Image (tube, grey):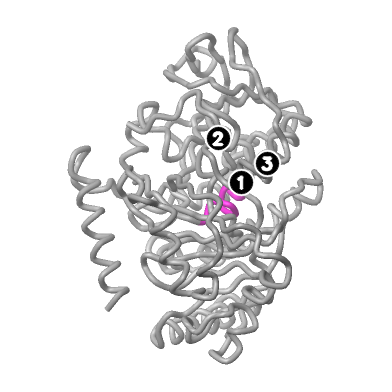
């Protein structure tokens, strides 16, 4: 069991540069509301904000602090689409529906952009994104991806970047090509999440921190969420705890695996050195199964992420291990000091497609973002709010996707996934 109740934000660059220190009281009473949202990350806050703007009363419960989990620790990469390939959806729905799902993947980034503009969220939003090819076969796949997006979906925003042009984005000899996307980018994820909380609170959402939902029971009027020192009676419930929801909804927990990912932040490099290292200020990820991802922060630090693992234990000497990976791409930063090192868990499904649905007609959930949470959580919140507001057609599209339990049961599924990830890492190396 992952322990997370009543904890402060983990030490990280994001926590150190957070621009909102607002705290919210724990729930210590019995309250009633239209909707109870469980989880104070991007999913829960996006849902709560959308519902409040539609006129619903909303209570949001967070077991620790707003943005404590992946929402406040991730790489901050805002990427159009989904973690899985689009053909994953083709296995479960006709092409007309696949086209709609594709369009929603583009819409997700627009939702984030509009919320930041509307609510004046200061989170360093920057557009520009490059998928970097480590090998020639990756380059071929990127060209195919660009061509398929144009011919199949009429989407022309991807631009192939040849090897000699990659230096315009990344000062490294490591990559043989790339795919540039102007409609994707990066942001400060914790400040974005804290901004969503401010917007939700301003729209009338009641937010309670340090309040763990311990039980969910059916009542004559709807559902009761029982907490340590209070309870919430609600007509609807939204489960938005993702990787931390296990004991409240075991059936959902079996569909996802918490996957750890880690980041480091260098000292500020100075304006000239930062711009020479990442000339176009894009976010980057590579094409390996065990991928690296990186970008510059607004104050000129290189943020380097990777070392995905199904283990709940961080690598020994995390900062040094991550630094070694960083220097494979940027040997010129050998003298740069590492100021921060941290990690967190993303929730991955077997097929890497997002998992949206209902446990009961009025109990909704969204999980399984598989590394694309910054954008797809915004879409999840919009679709759940639509469904509660009697417009469920778009939400129900995702219910067509069949999600399997991770094999191996409670004891073996983590070791089995560790073996699979080790295999992919070996294939990347070879």
Q: Earlier in the sequence, mark 3 or mark 2?
A: 2
Instruction: Judge whether residue 337 can be spotted in this image.
Output: yes
* Quarter occupied by residue 337: bottom right
- Between 91 and 417, the residue placed more toward the observer is 417
Secondary structure of residue under mark 1: helix
Asked if residue 388 lies left or right of residue 327, the reply is: right
Image coords of residue 429 (percent x, y) = 30, 75
At 71% from the left and 28% from the top, the residue drawn is: 22
- Between 36 and 211, the residue placed more toward the observer is 211
At 58% from the left and 86% from the top, the residue drawn is: 161
Residue underneath mark 3? 18
Vertical placement of residue 306 versus 56, above or below:
below
Asked if residue 88 lies left or right of residue 276, the reply is: left
Residues rendered magenta in the picture: 372-379
Badges 3 and 1: C-beta atoms under 8 Å apart?
yes
Query: In the rendered structure, does residue 224 fall within the stretch colored magenta?
Result: no
Image coords of residue 6 (percent x, y) = 50, 23
Q: CA distance from mark 1 to mark 2?
A: 9 Å
At 47% from the left and 12% from the top, the residue drawn is: 228
Secondary structure of residue under mark 2: loop
Q: Which mark is residue 9?
A: 2
Vertical placement of residue 327 versus 354, above or below:
below
* Quarter occupied by residue 92: bottom left
Q: CA distance from mark 3 to mark 2?
A: 10 Å
Q: CA distance from mark 3 to mark 1?
A: 6 Å
- Between 166 and 337, the residue placed more toward the observer is 337
Q: Earlier in the sequence, mark 1 or mark 2?
A: 2
Q: Which mark is residue 84?
A: none
Within 10 angstroms of label 1, few (less than 14), some, or many (20 or more) residues? many
Badges 1 and 2: C-beta atoms under 8 Å apart?
yes
Q: Quadrant of the N terminus?
A: top left
Residue underneath mark 1? 14
């Amino acid at each position: 069991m992952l322990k997370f109740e009543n904890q402060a934000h983990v030490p990280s660059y994001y926590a150190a540069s957070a621009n909102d220190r607002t705290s919210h009281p724990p729930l210590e009473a019995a309250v009633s509301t239209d909707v109870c949202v469980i989880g104070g990350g991007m999913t829960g806050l996006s849902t709560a904000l959308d519902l409040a703007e539609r006129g619903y009363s909303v209570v949001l419960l967070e077991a620790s602090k707003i943005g404590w989990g992946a929402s406040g620790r991730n790489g901050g990469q805002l990427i159009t689409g989904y973690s899985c390939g689009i053909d994953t959806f083709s296995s479960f729905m006709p092409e007309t529906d696949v086209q709609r799902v594709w369009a929603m993947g583009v819409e997700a980034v627009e939702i984030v952009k509009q919320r930041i503009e509307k609510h004046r969220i200061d989170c360093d939003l920057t557009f520009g994104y490059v998928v970097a090819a480590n090998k020639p076969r990756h380059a071929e796949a990127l060209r195919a991806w660009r061509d398929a997006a144009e011919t199949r979906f009429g989407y022309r925003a991807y631009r192939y970047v040849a090897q000699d042009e990659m230096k315009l984005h990344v000062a490294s000899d490591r990559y043989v090509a790339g795919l540039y996307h102007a409609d994707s980018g990066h942001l400060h994820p914790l400040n974005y999440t804290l901004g969503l909380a401010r917007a939700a609170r301003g729209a009338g959402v009641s937010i309670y921190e340090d309040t763990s939902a311990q039980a969910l029971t059916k009542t004559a009027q709807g559902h009761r969420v029982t907490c340590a020192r209070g309870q919430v009676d609600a007509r609807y419930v939204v489960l938005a705890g993702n990787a931390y929801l296990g004991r409240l909804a075991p059936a959902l927990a079996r569909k996802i695996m918490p996957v750890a990912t880690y980041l480091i932040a260098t000292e500020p490099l100075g304006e000239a050195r930062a711009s020479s290292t990442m000339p176009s200020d894009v976010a980057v990820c590579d094409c390996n199964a065990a991928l690296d991802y990186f970008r510059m922060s607004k104050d000129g630090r290189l943020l380097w992420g990777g070392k995905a693992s199904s283990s709940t234990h961080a690598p020994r000497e995390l900062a040094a291990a991550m630094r070694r990976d960083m220097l494979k791409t940027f040997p010129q930063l050998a003298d740069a000091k590492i100021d921060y090192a941290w990690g967190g868990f993303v929730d991955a499904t077997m097929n890497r497609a997002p998992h949206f649905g209902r446990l009961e007609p009025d109990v909704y959930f969204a999980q399984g973002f598989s590394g694309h949470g910054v954008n797809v959580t915004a879409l999840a919140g919009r679709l759940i709010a639509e469904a509660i507001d009697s417009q469920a057609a778009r939400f129900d599209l995702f219910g067509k996707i069949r999600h399997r339990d991770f094999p191996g049961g409670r004891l073996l599924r983590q070791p089995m996934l560790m073996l699979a990830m080790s295999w992919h890492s070996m294939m990347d190396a070879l």
